[in-house]
Amino acid sequence: MYGKERACVCRQTPVTFASGHEMLSEHKVIVVGLDNAGKTTILYQFLTKEAVHTSPTIGSNVEEIIVRNTHFMVWDIGGQESLRASWYSYYSNTEIILLVVDSTDRERLPITRDELHQMLAHEDLQNAAVLILANKQDMKGSMTVAEISQCLTLNSITSHPWHVQACCALTGEGLPACLDWMKSQVVVN
Ligand SMILES: Nc1nc2c(ncn2[C@@H]2O[C@H](COP(=O)(O)OP(=O)(O)O)[C@@H](O)[C@H]2O)c(=O)[nH]1
Ligand SMILES: [Mg+2]
């Protein structure tokens, strides 16, 4: 866990830094999505491979995830309406946006669509890749990846690399594939 100072570190592109005897690259990831989508559960599932009990995120959590020598600094940003207006303050130097969707929340998916397209227009996110996580696939009646893609009008996105992954944060199903895609994007870039 890093303190507030970490938020001030600005880096343009993946950089390498010495840690022990290894040279490692570090990549900034932001986790966004509406409140209750499962953002915090996913972050801790990445870290511990266990489902954890979460409470609504006030402000942000940041954790480092290491996937075979690739370091991701993952910022979990609160998704309540009052906090969404400050998402932009986390954007600079972001390489990957993880957009978490509660696949049972049909009613609020248009809000997510609007937030997504607004984010992609932001100048600080022009070089970011977007991974949409269709979470809560274990729940009865959850929307499929195809339904979510259509509602979010993903096919209209040509400015950024994107990918949709079905997952269940409680069991971790689908999350290894997310990490593989994230790694493939930072290697490509
Ligand atoms: N059934 C189910 N519940 C989930 C899943 N992911 C998260 N949750 C639950 O959804 C609620 C909100 O999760 P949380 O991670 O706090 O959402 P956040 O507000 O986006 O950070 C919690 O009760 C989680 O246990 C999932 O894949 N399936
Ligand atoms: Mg949270």
Image (cartoon, helix red, strand yellow):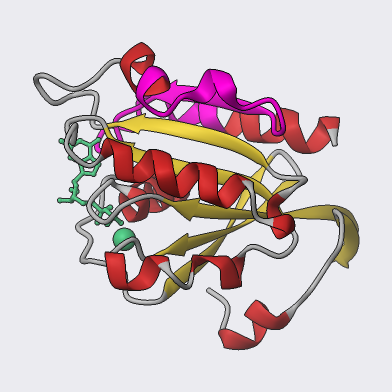
Residue shown at the point (58%, 78%) measured from the top left: 2
Direction from residue 31 to residue 29 in the image, left or right: right
Q: Is residue 31 above or below residue 116?
A: below
Q: Residue reaching furthest left?
A: 140
Q: Is residue 60 magenta?
A: no
Direction from residue 169 to residue 73 in the image, left or right: right
Residue 98 percent across, percent down from the top left: 51, 43
Residue shown at the point (69%, 52%) measured from the top left: 125
Q: Is residue 176 above or below residue 38?
A: above
Is residue 20 at least partly visible in the picture? no
Direction from residue 142 to residue 6 in the image, left or right: right
What quarter of the picture does the C terminus occupy?
top right
Res 19 → quadrant: bottom right
From which residue to which does the magenta span run? Answer: 150-178
Direction from residue 151 to residue 66 in the image, left or right: right
Res 74 → quadrant: bottom right
Looking at this view, is 55 or 156 the one in front? Answer: 156
